Structure formats: C-alpha cells, structure tokens
Image (tube, rainbow, N blue to C red):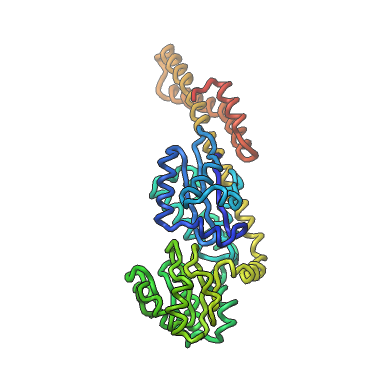
Amino acid sequence: MKLRMVGCSHHHAGADIRERLAFTPDEAAAALTEWRDVLPGAEGVLLATCNRIEFYAATADGGLPPCPALIARHLANSRRLSMDEVRPHLMTLRDEQAVDHLFRVAASLDSMVLGEPQILAQVKQAYEMARDAQSAGPLTHDCFQRALRVARRVASETDLHKHRVSIPSVAIADFAARIFERFDDKRVLVVGAGEMADETLRYLTDQGARHPVIVNRSLDRAEALAEQWQGRATTLDHLVDELAEADLVITATAAGEPILTADTFRRRVGPKRAQRPLFVLDLSMPRDFDPAIGREPGVYLYSIDDLSAACERNRDARRRELPRAERIVVEERDRFFVDARHRLSAPVIARLREGLDQPKQAELERLFNKLPGLDPVARQEIERFADRLVNKMLHPPMESLRDESREGSPHGLLQALSRLFQLKD
C-alpha cells in the first residue's frame, strides 16, 4: 500500500493555524484539481472541516509512495502560506496508520465531541468532491468506502450515537445555559444555512427556542431552512440589524474570512444593544466573528477551541462505548488489508492458472489426436481429470498466498512464484 496522510487537527493545532489552513468548498476543489494536474498518477482526497485539514494521497503499486513534503507544500501553497508557517503543525501518517486514522475519524472517535454526527457526512462529501475533481482513484475509493462502512457499524452496533450529541448541543448546554435560564423567550439568530446550522436549530428547538432568524448569503437556502424550522430568512446585508436584536447567535458559514469585524460591531451593533447579554457561538473555521468582539460589554463569544473542556466531559460520559467501537475499527482495518493483499495476489494467481491451462490444453489435444476413437463421455471424463489435476496443483500456492495475506505482506511469495513459474508481468 502507498497511502499518506498529511494534515492537522484540533488535537495539535490551534484555531489560529487551522483557520489559516482552512478551505472553502471551492478552494478545496481547486486544490484537488491542481494536485491532479501536477501529479497525474497520484490520487488525492482533501478532508477540510472546522476541526481538521487532512490531505490523503495515494499512488499505484508501480509508482513511488506519495512524498509527505510535497503534500505539505501543496497544502501551504494552496493557502498561500510558507512551509515554515505550517510545518510545525502538520503530522504525517503512512499506510496502516493512515487507514486506521481515517476509520477513526469517520466513526467520530477522533472528534472533539465524541460521537458527533456531522463528521460522517463530511468524510463522504470529501470523497465525492475528490471523485468529481477526478483526483480520487482505486486506493482512496477503497479506503473511504470502508471508512463509511466502519462509521455505520459503530453507529449501529454501539451506543456511541444513542443520543444526538454535537458541538452546538454541547456548547449550548454547557455555555449558553449559564447565561440564559430558558430559550423560548430568546431571539435566536443563525448565520449560515448548512448542515451545522440545521443541527444547531434542531437542538435549540428541542430546548424551546421558537421562530429563529436565519441569515445567509443565499436567500433561497435561508428560506428553505427557515421554512423547516418555522423561522424567518434574510441575507447577510441585514446581519448588523439582526445582531442588534438578537440574544443568542450561532454562526457557521464557509465565508473563508471574518464577516463581522470588531470595529463594525463597536460602531453599529454595540450602541443599539445597551450592553444586553449576547451569546455568540462561532462554529466557523476561519472564524466568522473577530475574536476581539468577545471583549465588548455584554458579549459572550465562544469559538470551537473554547469547547474543549466541555467536550472532554462528554467524552468521559461516552468512554465506556469506546472499546466496542475501537474493536470494530481494528476488525475492519485488518479485513481491509487482507482484502488489499488478496487483490495484489490476484494477477499472479491468474497468470499462474493461465500458465498451467495452456500446457493442459495442448496435452489434451495431443492425446485426443492419438485416440480419435474416444466416445464423448470418455473425452469429457479425461477433460475433468485434467481440470481437477490443475486445480490440485494450484491449491497449495493459493493457500500459501491466502495465509500470507492474513499474516503479512505476500510480496516475497509472489516474487518467488513469478520466478519459479516464469510468469510474465
């Protein structure tokens, strides 16, 4: 296998570096297209969320493994950053490590909120984007399809997802509840109309919030979400006016840059609020609101990284489900590599069978020419005998290959068989 993952996550990179490395969907698609154009023989999938930026690269069996330094440089160049800025924050995983990591990410075992539901859709979307950009290939296809299988098994065979737990739900339950005793009388403003916004509205509605205001660049998407949650829709042009009236704001856009500066808030929003409490949960990466806004009177501004302690408490409550989930990951990872090694063996087995079939057919023809009087039943029985003999001769090397695939790499045995039987490439 020739798979590499280069990237960073909330585990070892702060919000400042993650937002500088963050990709909008259009930027991610452009990065994949450029990767394909620069390295036509290499596969690539970019997983970019608010908590992680990970580039998975693979090459065919005949080529060299993807170069981690080249992948890191591609990430840096795509975001117009220098290598010195990003190198200390990037990690590299190879082959089994990369597969294991991807499986754990898809199953939400590596998430800030253990068991959060959004990551599975994000992994799926990352693969679909790579497929659309024609940067995915056989190896990344197998890896990502198996990762989705792992996630579905963890969801169905453990209680990790028994209760819907997400970053918005943890933030509102642990932070907003300290400021507001109830939500049914609060004016809720949601900026963005994507999956995170929908997840936030679902939780807020369960907590009693009513008639939210959805602000989005595209009015059509805002209206669709507003209709679903019995709210009102407007565009980003009216963000300042809506902020002046809001009590609780959740922002989750893919803007790529701040949509509200501290200066704008100070001049146009703050004076209208008269220091009324304003809870802001910024779930975007890069952040939508300038962090300096959190220092304004009456403003309680939290970003993704502020949730780490609350998320750790959530992880503790769900930790008892981790062993079962981890066993599924290990089981599927081992099965994945056994299947991969079987696929590696298949061409050699096919050539070996072909190498035995050809002399078998030649010898049968020679025998039948010497015995022209054979009746059809006798000829058929002789052909069956020859087939059984070939199959019995193939059985020991095929069993050895299967055993080697289960226990380790079959490369050495494949090379030995190729040389012993003079199999052509």
Asked whether 332 or 231 is in front, the reply is: 231
> With 244 as the anchor, is 223 left or right in this view?
left
Residue drawn at x 48%, y 48% is 77
Work out whether 83 lies above or below 123. above
Give how far across and how far down residue 301 sits, in percent.
Answer: 54, 74
> Which residue is farthest top?
370
Give how far across and how far down residue 328 sits, in percent.
Answer: 60, 55
Work out whether 171 lies above or below 386. below
Give how far across and how far down residue 364 sits, in percent.
Answer: 45, 18
> Which residue is farthest left?
220
Work out whether 8 lies above or below 230. above
Q: Quadrant of residue 163?
A: bottom right
Residue 106 can be seen, yes or no? no
Asked whether 256 or 28 is in front, the reply is: 256
Q: Quadrant of residue 242?
A: bottom left
Give how far across and how far down residue 144 sits, in percent.
Answer: 50, 50
Residue 90 can be seen, yes or no? yes
> Which quarter of the image is occupied by the N terminus?
top right
Q: Quadrant of residue 393?
A: top right
Q: What is the tally of numbered marks visible in this picture?
A: 0
